Amino acid sequence: MKQDVDSAKAVMRELFAPTPLQHNLFLSDKYGARIFLKREDLSPVRSYKIRGAFNFFRKALAADDPAERFVCASAGNHAQGFAFVCRHFKKPGVVFMPVTTPPQKIDKTKAFGGDFIDVRLHGDIFDECYAAAKAHSKETGALMVPPFDHPDIIEGQATVAAEILDQLPGDANPDLFIIPVGGGGLSAGMTGYLGGRIGNESFVFCEPEGAPSLKESLTAGKRIKLDQVDNFVDGAAVAEIGSRNFDALKSFAADQVMLIAENAVCVTISELLNVEGVVLEPAGALAIAALEEMDRQSIAGKTVIVIVSGGNFDFERLPDVKERAMRHSGLKKYFILRMAQRPGALRDFLNMLGPEDDIARFEYLKKSARNFGSVLIGIETKRPENFDALTGAFDDAGLRYEDITDNEVLASLII
């Protein structure tokens, strides 16, 4: 595999320079380790997906019967990598996207592909647009370019590992690789390339808590298709890991897969944006977020390579990211209060707030009650422990309340 990947890496230089491997001082100081970030968010399409697409195309075009038309189904980074490569090779391609795809993603795909790309919106969910893409391939003879489950895609993604070995300083021997997992193309490629150089125990894989396809599959000893996934970390929210990808990863232990809460990813996105000025999409922040969940002693003094897989972030999502980050950090809570309907009741409540507490939302849920009214209130504070003092004041005053911050059903309905 090494020779093929090295060849792919060399040819890839006609398309873009290696993405940086950066020693990050902020994260290194925070976690007491020597942490390097492989910045795939700085590729021409702001994700590693361009690698697999390029490798697939170059091999298809070098075949005895080369393809002349290509098609893919994607609502994200795969579509953008596909479009960029279509333009590079001057080959026509059709991208099928769900009708629900945000306009920003559609526009970026069109911009990367230019006149060589035809974007077609079909269906409300990915499965429907994927079926349309397969039907188009059958009807027209266009070659389907899969997002992760293909040997040429895996080989292209493995060039990330090849670049890392070229870029590491001479005094840095990697102790740990932290790799985000969606369909498994990146992790299968990197572990395959590094096998024999790095032991299996030196890999940690990260999945969103709401899409644990690899972990469930390793636990079961066979591929498992999830009944449902949380699409917040959209670049890694895959219901079933690829077949070839699972074969490449099935020797790893299930406990090497960390499940990262979606709201924890939001904390990392906010922190890297505010402290480092780095814009990351949720999947791109996934491996960095894993550092916070690790035992500090287990990584102290070690050289840790973290794969930053993408930076295609839609800033319209920023308010939701901030909200989720504050809730996860314990700096924002929502309560339903049963407040007396009498003069001075609101003033009494306000007097319970501490100097660092702020009301972010106040809404009567039922205004017709004669004696008591139900109130939805959102409170932000500077330190998590401030809520202990606040709820203690509620209890002392005999105020009836319910903390609904972590109640996903109620939160989705009324917050």
Image (cartoon, rainbow, N blue to C red):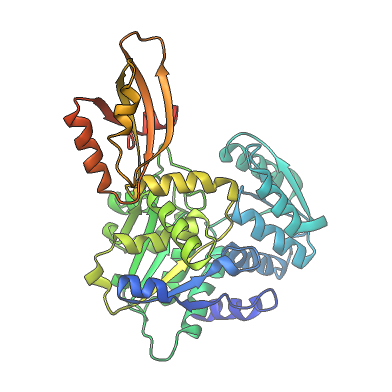
**Could you tell me how many numbered marks the image carries?**
0
In the image, 348: left or right of 61? left
Quick check: can you spot residue 262? no
* Residue drawn at 70 percent across, 53 percent down: 109
* 276 shown above or below 259: below
Residue 401, given in percent of the width and then of the height, sits at 26, 27
* Residue drawn at 63 percent across, 42 percent down: 101
Q: Nearer the viewer, residue 273 or 341?
A: 341
In the image, 202: left or right of 52? left
Image quadrant assignment for residue 50: bottom right
Image quadrant assignment for residue 55: bottom right
Residue 388, given in percent of the width and then of the height, sits at 22, 42
Quick check: can you spot residue 196? yes
* 390 shown above or below 5: above
Q: Nearer the viewer, residue 390 or 267?
A: 390
Residue 346, given in percent of the width and then of the height, sits at 34, 25
In the image, 367: left or right of 258? right
Q: Residue furthest bottom?
A: 170
Q: Nearer the viewer, residue 200 or 25?
A: 25
Q: Residue furthest left?
A: 396
Residue 91, given in percent of the width and then of the height, sits at 78, 61
Dividing the image into 4 quarters, which one contains the C terminus?
top left
